[in-house]
């Protein structure tokens, strides 16, 4: 301890701005207690962390402070935000240790363990993901000696610290390192011994419900919660403000008809479960059927499987439950996201059954029966016609009720002559589909004529009315700002959708507005191919439904009987084998979604996701103005600090109050912003949105009252000796400027562990010529007008071409692009010759033929 330094703590004032009362209060709490700081987004939680980290470095020589963030892009952003300010604060302190190189480091998964072991011994400030800390403690890469140097843990996005997530595990490992046992349960009669390190947790809202908040308090050793909302009196003066506009989107007649067709398929499965198997109550409204409620019915059935009165296999019934859960999810996709995501899920089922029949895959008996039912045949016919119309293909006329081109499951002709399946007989018995046509959305029906969904679709429809409204809102935003406003050059838009398939469709639609709209997807990393209809959970959830290799519950339909391993049940069926799961499957928020795999093009980022390197590149282009719209999944909800974002569009409404607050918080950070929420009329989306708002207010009120929480005051160490004058250090204000912070950020005292950044470090001082926003606008206009295809021709569309650079060069050389506009494009690009016409130095690999040809073209 540095007793001389402990008499004061330094508080920076940026550019002469006065200190904020709520930040001072939070800092004082964090210095002396394990504190959970819950502040609205954009209210300066990072500054609070910087002040605490810098002062702990003064007070405890040779100590180690660790800043943990959940993703690599967020780790990089936080290091860039904190690094210069920490160094500036320490340079103003007479009693601070001398700054040395490699004191501030960033660690990620690409850093070799031997390198990390060396950095742990030299660093004073480490920015990393919690998995790095957890794995290095377990493996010994972080030695016991260095681990005991840790005096401060800063945990960003602390609401993640539930279950077995690495936040709570890392804190528990550090505690065990000091006490040789795990943290005991809270017992006020026998207080536990604290660990000699401070834990500081940051979040916008602690949790969606009180049980999650209690778990966070226990896992992060929280002894005090410092909470403020946007209505708090000491926060209101610093809120830039956000205007939230809720747009309820009416369902067009064709979409209502398509939903009714899909509801018939759901009704078939629900009839089997309720009227035949007596396993659940018959749902009253198939259009609003919730997969969660079906899972609850399935769990109740599993608890009483011994009393099965239907005489059918319990596994067969549970497989039918899985079918109904998945169908309910498809209904949600159709109602809230559009035709194409729902069609891709439906088409995948047909392909899966076809592969199972050809012995190239596997499918459950329940899925085979569903795909072979006449309700499914009608569904396939209607949706294929809609998709063909959406893609501009001619729709072949067919007899009403025929299943022409019904897909890989192999039906042709008319349903009246097709051989009925056993589930068709069940459906007919309960009169599922033999009902008279009903008027849809006020559209009259001609006598004797059954309208189809495609006949009700208007010309040029986009797959969902949300897409049409989104294009209107985005175009109006940019067009309005371009009328002489200085904000026009810097304004940004973020569009959120929780499904990757929707992200791809949104990007494709917005590309038609290029160069006014320059958009890119921003999604998480994919754990498996073909996950575009799944919620993007690669950065948010742990675990997955327990499924066997055959895709069924306790095995699929295969060669053997019911049981373990590669067998199936009911003696045969289709497919090569079953699974390895025993007992009924685990349930989570995405149960049943794994089966909704789609067949997008392999170049679609929804298939393979984006690596963390690609995510960082997307964010850099967004910040620099090369793109002005990003379409993001949940990976973009946390921590993105881009002050120019003036508009947030929620393509769907999240049911979690945490996610809703995180999305809204991406705007209004530097100036007043606007939030638009799309709500599909007469769907569960409206109720989910209102419930998320209510839950947020209820949780905040309960936390503020503190009646249901047991704070861990017993394991919050004092850290400072009681012999200090007045019992605590006095605040000493220092004045900093942003220029000073930027200079400190580039003085070389921080280390990057990336090989690529170390290679480029010696070239940071090379002169570069930038391209202005006006040049970029002109470039995007030309690109959208003349995009060269792989055959050397020019394609008129707004998408990035898949052709090689050599093909593009040939097309330009031989005059595929008009000379005047080619000259304009070349002039714009040649303004950046410093970074386009010079080959960068290389060490282990040579330049490719593509980059060499590009350099020659740009060099003239």
Image: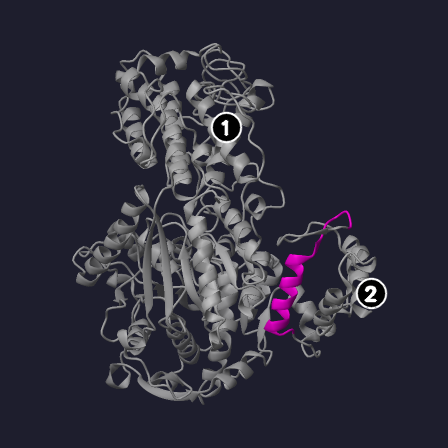
User: Of the residues under marks 2 and 1, which one precedes in the sequence?
Assistant: 1
> Would residue 404 appear left or right of 219 to someone viewing this image?
right
> Residue 586, can we see it?
no
Colour mode? one colour
x, y percentage for residue 659?
Answer: 36, 54
Task: Find out whether residue 786 is within the magenta segment.
Answer: yes
Magenta segment, which residues?
771-792
The image quadrant of residue 13 is bottom left
> Would residue 182 appear left or right of 146 to someone viewing this image?
left
- Is disc 2 in contact with disc 1, using a CB cutoff of under 8 Å? no
Q: At x 47% / y 18%, what residue is drawn?
A: 372
Task: Find out whether residue 165 is within the magenta segment.
Answer: no
Residue of label 2: 856
The image quadrant of residue 276 is top left
Compared with 668, 593 (above or below) is: above
Q: Quadrant of the C terminus?
A: bottom right
Residue of label 1: 349
- Give how far apart the Cα atoms at labels 2 and 1 are: 50 Å
Viewer-proximal residue among 232 and 538: 232
x, y percentage for residue 20?
Answer: 31, 80
In what element is the residue under mark 1? helix
Viewer-proximal residue among 701 and 79: 701
């Amino acid at each position: 301890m540095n007793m001389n330094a402990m008499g004061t703590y330094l508080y920076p004032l940026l550019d002469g701005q006065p200190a904020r009362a709520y930040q001072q209060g939070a800092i004082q709490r964090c210095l002396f207690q394990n504190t959970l700081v819950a502040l609205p987004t954009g209210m300066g939680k990072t500054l609070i962390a910087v002040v605490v980290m810098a002062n702990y470095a003064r007070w405890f020589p040779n100590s180690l402070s660790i800043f943990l963030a959940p993703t690599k892009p967020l780790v990089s952003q936080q290091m860039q935000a904190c690094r210069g300010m920490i160094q500036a604060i320490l340079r103003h302190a007479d009693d601070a240790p001398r700054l040395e190189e490699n004191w501030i480091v960033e660690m990620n998964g690409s850093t070799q363990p031997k390198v990390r072991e060396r950095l742990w011994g030299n660093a004073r400030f480490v920015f990393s993901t919690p998995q790095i800390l957890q794995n290095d403690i377990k493996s010994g890469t972080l030695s016991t000696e260095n681990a005991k140097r840790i005096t401060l843990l800063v945990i960003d996005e602390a609401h993640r610290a539930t279950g077995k997530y690495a936040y709570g595990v890392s804190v528990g490992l550090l505690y065990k390192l000091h006490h040789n046992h795990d943290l005991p349960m809270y017992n006020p009669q026998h207080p536990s011994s604290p660990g000699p390190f401070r834990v500081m947790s940051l979040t916008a809202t602690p949790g969606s419900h009180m049980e999650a908040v209690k778990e966070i308090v226990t896992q992060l050793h929280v002894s005090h919660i410092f909470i403020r909302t946007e209505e708090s009196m000491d926060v209101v003066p610093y809120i830039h403000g956000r205007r939230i506009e809720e747009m309820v989107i009416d369902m067009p007649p064709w979409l209502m008809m398509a939903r009714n067709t899909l509801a018939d398929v759901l009704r078939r499965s629900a009839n089997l479960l309720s009227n035949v198997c007596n396993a659940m109550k018959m749902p009253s409204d198939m259009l609003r059927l919730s997969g969660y409620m079906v899972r609850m019915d399935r769990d109740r059935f599993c608890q009483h499987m011994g009393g099965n009165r239907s005489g059918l296999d319990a596994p067969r019934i549970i497989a039918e439950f899985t079918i109904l859960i998945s169908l309910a999810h498809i209904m949600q996709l159709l109602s809230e996201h559009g035709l194409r995501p729902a069609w891709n899920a439906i088409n995948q089922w047909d392909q899966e059954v076809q592969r199972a029949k050809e012995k190239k895959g596997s499918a459950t008996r329940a899925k085979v029966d569903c795909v072979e039912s006449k309700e499914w045949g009608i569904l396939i016919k209607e949706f294929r016609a809609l998709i063909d119309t959406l893609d501009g293909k001619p729709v072949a006329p067919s007899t009403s009720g025929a299943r022409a081109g019904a897909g890989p499951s192999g039906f042709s002709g008319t349903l009246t002559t097709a051989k009925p399946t056993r589930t068709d007989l069940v459906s007919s018995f309960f009169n599922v589909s033999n009902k008279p046509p009903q008027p849809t959305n006020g559209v009259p029906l001609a006598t004797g004529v059954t309208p189809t969904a495609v006949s009700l679709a208007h010309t040029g429809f986009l797959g969902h009315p949300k897409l049409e409204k989104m294009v209107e809102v985005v175009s109006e935003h940019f067009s309005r700002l371009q009328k002489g406003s200085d904000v026009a050059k810097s304004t940004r838009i973020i569009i959120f959708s929780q499904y990757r398939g929707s992200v791809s469709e949104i990007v494709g639609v917005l590309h038609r507005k290029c160069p006014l709209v320059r958009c890119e997807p921003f999604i998480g990393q994919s754990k498996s191919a073909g996950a575009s209809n799944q919620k993007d959970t690669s950065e948010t959830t742990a675990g997955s439904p327990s499924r066997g290799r055959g895709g069924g519950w306790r095995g699929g339909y295969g060669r053997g009987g019911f049981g373990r391993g590669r067998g199936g049940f009911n003696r045969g069926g289709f497919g090569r084998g079953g699974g390895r799961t025993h007992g009924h499957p685990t349930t989570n928020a995405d149960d049943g979604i794994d089966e909704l795999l789609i067949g997008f093009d392999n170049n679609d980022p929804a298939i393979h996701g984006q690596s963390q390197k690609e995510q960082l590149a997307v964010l850099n282009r967004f910040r620099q103005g090369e793109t002005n719209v990003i379409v993001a999944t949940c990976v973009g909800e946390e921590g993105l600090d881009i002050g120019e974002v003036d508009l947030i569009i929620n393509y769907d409404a999240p049911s979690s109050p945490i996610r809703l607050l995180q999305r809204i918080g991406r705007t209004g950070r530097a100036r007043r912003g606007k939030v638009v929420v799309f709500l599909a009329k007469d769907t569960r989306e409206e109720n989910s949105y209102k419930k998320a708002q209510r839950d947020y207010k209820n949780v905040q009120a309960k936390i503020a009252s503190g009646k249901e929480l047991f704070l861990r005051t017993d394991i919050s160490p004092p850290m400072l000796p009681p012999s200090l004058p007045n019992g605590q250090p006095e605040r000493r204000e220092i004045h900093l400027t942003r220029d000073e912070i930027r200079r400190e950020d580039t003085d070389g005292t921080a280390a990057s562990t990336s090989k690529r950044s170390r290679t480029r470090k010696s070239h940071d001082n090379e002169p570069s010529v930038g391209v202005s926003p006006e040049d970029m606008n002109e470039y995007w206009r030309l690109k959208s007008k003349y995009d060269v295809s792989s055959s050397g021709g020019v394609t008129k569309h707004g998408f990035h071409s898949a052709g090689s650079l050599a093909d593009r060069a040939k097309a330009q050389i031989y005059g595929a692009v008009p000379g005047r506009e080619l000259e304009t494009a070349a002039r714009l690009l040649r303004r950046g010759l410093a970074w386009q016409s010079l080959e960068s130095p290389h060490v282990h690999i040579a330049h490719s033929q593509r980059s060499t040809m590009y350099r020659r073209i740009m060099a003239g």
